[in-house]
Image: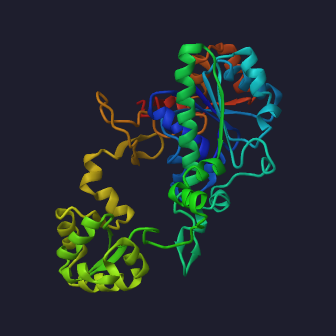
Amino acid sequence: MRVLDLSRALSGPFCGLILGDLGADVIKVEAIPDGDMIRAWGPFDRDESVYYLCGNRNKRDIGINFRCEEGRRLLREMALRCDVIIENFRPGTLAQMGLEPAGLRAEKPELIIASLSGFGSDGPLASRPGFDQIAQGYAGFMSFTGTPETGPTRVGVAIGDMTSGMWLAIGVLAAWAQRQQTGVGRVIETSLLSSLVSLLSVQGQRYLNLGEVAVPTGNVHPVIAPYGVFRAQDGNLNIGAATQDMWLSLCDVIGLAGLKDDERFTDNAGRMAHREELRLIIEERLATRTRADWTERLVEAGIPAGPINRIDDVVADAQVAHLDLIESFEHPTLGPMRQISSPLRMDGHDGRWIRKPPPVLGQHSRAILTDLGFSADEIAHWEETRVVYQNPHGSNYRDGREKVA
């Protein structure tokens, strides 16, 4: 699968990253002179944006002048030589660039065009720009994330961007599978709003069935008790006594067997009604031991429990290491670096997903155009007229991995 990734920031690039992890040849197209807007977002490791690094591995990179007519003609010709186009411009922008989906697919019916937007390609909000936190608020996520004291709180990562990228990748794979049978591609789209609404899960179903509007409940489960964050002697841990049997076992493990017969706590409805009283009783007992000690005791008794790790704890964790969730590789300018890898495991796969590090701007321009069948004279002309930018250091790296002596 050859993918032309015209997207910027995080949502579209994350779709391209997933496809690249799975083996697609992903060509990231960046507008020169500045490239993807995300390159300017901090924090920075030397001159490289870590925001850019997190969303652009397993891609090759070409820099093109979108503003000139010749650059737009080149983009169209490249699109017709690829299998998939990913874009997250505002609705209508693709047509203005000469890449109107209907026209492209009239010339190449097997082409798959995958589009992302903030609020959808049509409807009353179609023209609004899409930013993750705006979508989190609009989709209702922030209304039940947080505590009664803090009020609405955003999720700590760009969950709308990443979820929409994942959904778009699933759509591309479905269209690709169908294309093998029919020879015909599809136009696929999703949005930050659509993707976040799709994740409303039980909170959405509560309203649709019961008319109940979810509110922030902090670190406790909205419908199960005791289930949430509890303080032990040296810090917090999560405990999830999700069933009646788990509740009874919890009472035994923490030495509060008398709670089994307490009328306030005999069933989940009672424990929910007296949740704050129950939390104080449990935490008084948990204060006698460390969170690690309690975690071991609870897990041994079949009660889900675990620490609340920081990022440094996660990276150093033995289970995370066992699952190969952190990979090491060579970056063209940064040298040795690590990155969070794919969460997938496949039979027969060697476990290494990062084959190409995040590219520098224009690193592979010449090689990409050559692979797409353009002549050396055409490529030289585009470079001389600044339609295409080839990074002068790009040829010093083999596939972006190791520097040529």
- What percent of the width, then of the height, locates residue 270? 38, 77
Q: Is residue 113 left or right of residue 22?
A: right
- What percent of the width, then of the height, locates residue 99? 76, 28
Quadrant for the C terminus in the image: top left
Front residue of 26/329: it is 26
Front residue of 368/283: it is 283
Q: Tell me what residue is drawn at x 29 percent, y 27 percent.
A: 348
Q: Tell me what residue is drawn at x 45 percent, y 34 percent.
A: 21
Q: Is residue 47 among what the camera can see?
A: no
Quarter of the image for residue 42 reads bottom right
Q: Tell me what residue is drawn at x 38 percent, y 43 percent.
A: 343
Numbered label tally: 0
Depicted 168 relative to depicted 303: above or below: above
Depicted 264 relative to depicted 137: above or below: below
Depicted 264 relative to depicted 315: above or below: below
- What percent of the width, then of the height, locates residue 125? 78, 51
Q: Is residue 254 left or right of residue 281?
A: left
Q: Tell me what residue is drawn at x 62 percent, y 21 percent.
A: 82
Front residue of 63/230: it is 230
Quarter of the image for residue 316 reads bottom left
Coloration mode: rainbow
- What percent of the width, then of the height, locates residue 24? 50, 27
Q: Is residue 201 among what the camera can see?
A: yes
